[in-house]
Image (tube, helix red, strand yellow):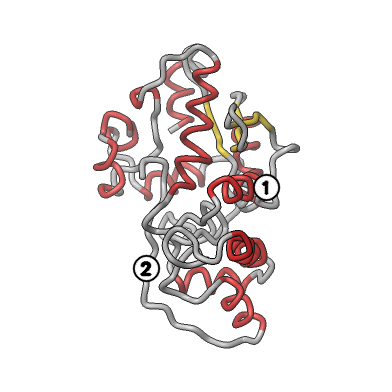
Amino acid sequence: MLKKVLDANNGLPADAIVCFANTGKEEEATLEFVRDCSINWNVQIIWFEFTSDEQSFRVVDFEKASRKGEPFNELILKKKYLPNPVTRFCTIEMKIRPITKYLKSLGWQVNEQFCWVGIRADEPRRYSKIGIDRCPLVSDGVTAKEVGEFWKAQDFDLKLSNFNGKTMHGNCDLCFLKGGNQIQSLIEEKPERAIWWANAETLIKSINVQSHDGTARFRKDRPSYQQMYDNAINQQALDFSDESIECFCGD
């Protein structure tokens, strides 16, 4: 979507800003990809992170971006409970509000029409929630196939494995909205991924024995991240019946 905007306007329009909100739990390849888009396409991308103070955001860059979940930690300490499938406040608090606050600090009169989202035409559940007008790729009929062909023709790409245009490594590395089998597989691939998530659950338990949804976990319908980590280390197989719940800035 960004490349289409740049090509259609001979660069970024004067009244447009490209934003990336870092949670501190992104894969390093994601951060490198955002940096590479900026370099290869000669476009400024504003990097944001959530802060728990009145301003609600800080502007960073590739070098200064958090990589150990620091923004997420701030949010959890502020809320004193964990986001979960019922109360999914992480996207709003760490992405939407910081960007909105930044634009308002520039004097913009912000409303939803100011935001374009790169949702594809083959993602009807997602674009039906926020409207086609905010999803230019939908209007152009762009699907995962076209996106895949586009990146094959580029000199750089997101260095994460994908299957049919989707990567199990996307968004926060072990986001609780990912399916249980997917999370367990990601932990088995790289066990240290689970450490921050397990620590977050321990932190909430120490602050408040019961979190907002009645547990001190991101999900009460599956084992804790510590248990999944232990299972991966001990090579014990688990089989989950739950599927991934898609997460994006329109939820």
> Quarter of the image holding residue 40?
top right
Classify residue 128 as left or right of residue 101. Answer: left
Name the foreground residue: 179 vs 11. 179
Residue wearing tag 1: 70
Q: Residue at x 74, y 37 (%)?
A: 64
Identify which amino acid the numbered label 1 is placed on. Answer: Glu
Label at residue 243: 2
- Between 166 and 127, which is closer to the camera in this rendering? 127
Q: Position of residue 153 (x, y in %)?
A: 51, 42
Residue farthest toward the right in the current orientation of the protein: 63
Image quadrant in which the C terminus is located = top left
Instruction: Estimate how packed mark 1 is, as few (under 14), some (14 to 19) or many (20 or more) residues with alpha carbons within 10 Å.
Output: some
- Residue ID at (61%, 49%): 77
Q: Residue at x 59, y 27 (%)?
A: 55
Relative image position of residue 227 (x, y in whole percent): 58, 78
Q: Nearer the viewer, mark 2 or mark 1?
A: 1
Task: Provide residue 158's location: percent of width, then percent of height.
Answer: 57, 48
Q: Residue flagged by tag 2: what amino acid is it? A: Glu
Quick one: SS at disc 1?
helix
Q: Looking at the rendering, in which quadrant would you find the N terminus? A: top left
Gap between marks 2 and 1, in whole Å? 28 Å
**Which comes before the other along the chain, label 2 or label 1?**
1
Q: Is residue 211 above or below residue 234?
A: above
* Relative vertical location of residue 121 with respect to residue 227 in this rendering, above or below: above
